[in-house]
Amino acid sequence: MWLRLTKYRLTLPTAYRFLVFGVMTLMSLVGFGIVVSAIRGSSQGPPLPFALLWCGAVAWNWYVLLGVPYEIRFDSDNRISFVSLARTTTLTASDIRSIKPYGGGVGFTCCVTMAARSGC
C-alpha cells in the first residue's frame, strides 16, 4: 500500500513570522496616525498626499503578504492548490513550467506557470 501525500505545509521560522506581521502591524498603526494627523491639519504632521501614499504602500504590502502560500494541496492526480490566508489558487500540474528557489528569500520558491506573464 502506497502512502499518498495530500498536502505539504510550507514553514518559516516562527521568529520570522512574528517579525513580518509585527512590522506590518506597526506600519499600519503609523499609517493610521499620520492620516489622522494630516486630516486634522496638524502643522507637525505630514501632508495628506504623503499619508495616503503611505497607506497605499502598506495596503499593497498586506495584499502581497496575505497572498503568500503556507500550504500546497494535491487535490487530485492533476490538480494542485496553493493556499494562503487571502486566497487559494488551483491549477493543473501541466500548467506549471518551473519551480525554483527564489534568490532573495528565506526558504521561498518561485513557481512559474503557463499563465504567468513573467518569470522570477
Image (cartoon, grey):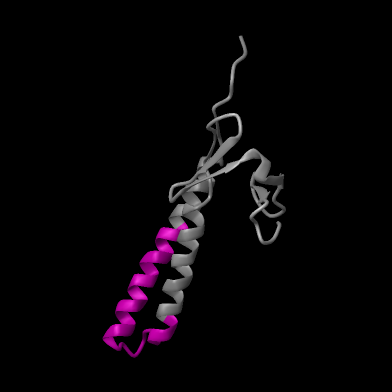
User: Would you say 115 lies left or right of 7 here?
Assistant: right
Front residue (pair 52, 119): 119
Q: From the viewer's perspective, is residue 9 above or below residue 36? A: above
Residue 50 locus on image (x, y percent): 44, 82
Q: Residue at x 45, y 49 (%)?
A: 87
Q: From the viewer's perspective, is residue 50 above or below residue 87? A: below
Quarter placement of the N terminus: top right
Residue 116 locus on image (x, y percent): 65, 57
User: Would you say 48 lies left or right of 70 here?
Assistant: left
Queried whether the magenta region covers residue 120, the answer comes back as: no
Front residue (pair 79, 59): 79
Q: Can I make out residue 36 in this image?
A: yes
Q: Residue at x 30, y 78 (%)?
A: 36
Quarter where residue 8 is shown:
top right
Q: Which residues are magenta?
A: 23-50
Q: Residue at x 34, y 71 (%)?
A: 32
Q: Residue at x 36, y 77 (%)?
A: 34
User: Would you say 105 lies left or right of 17 here?
Assistant: right
Farthest residue to the left: give it: 40
Queried whether the magenta region covers residue 32, the answer comes back as: yes
The overriding secondary structure of the stretch rendered in magenta is helix
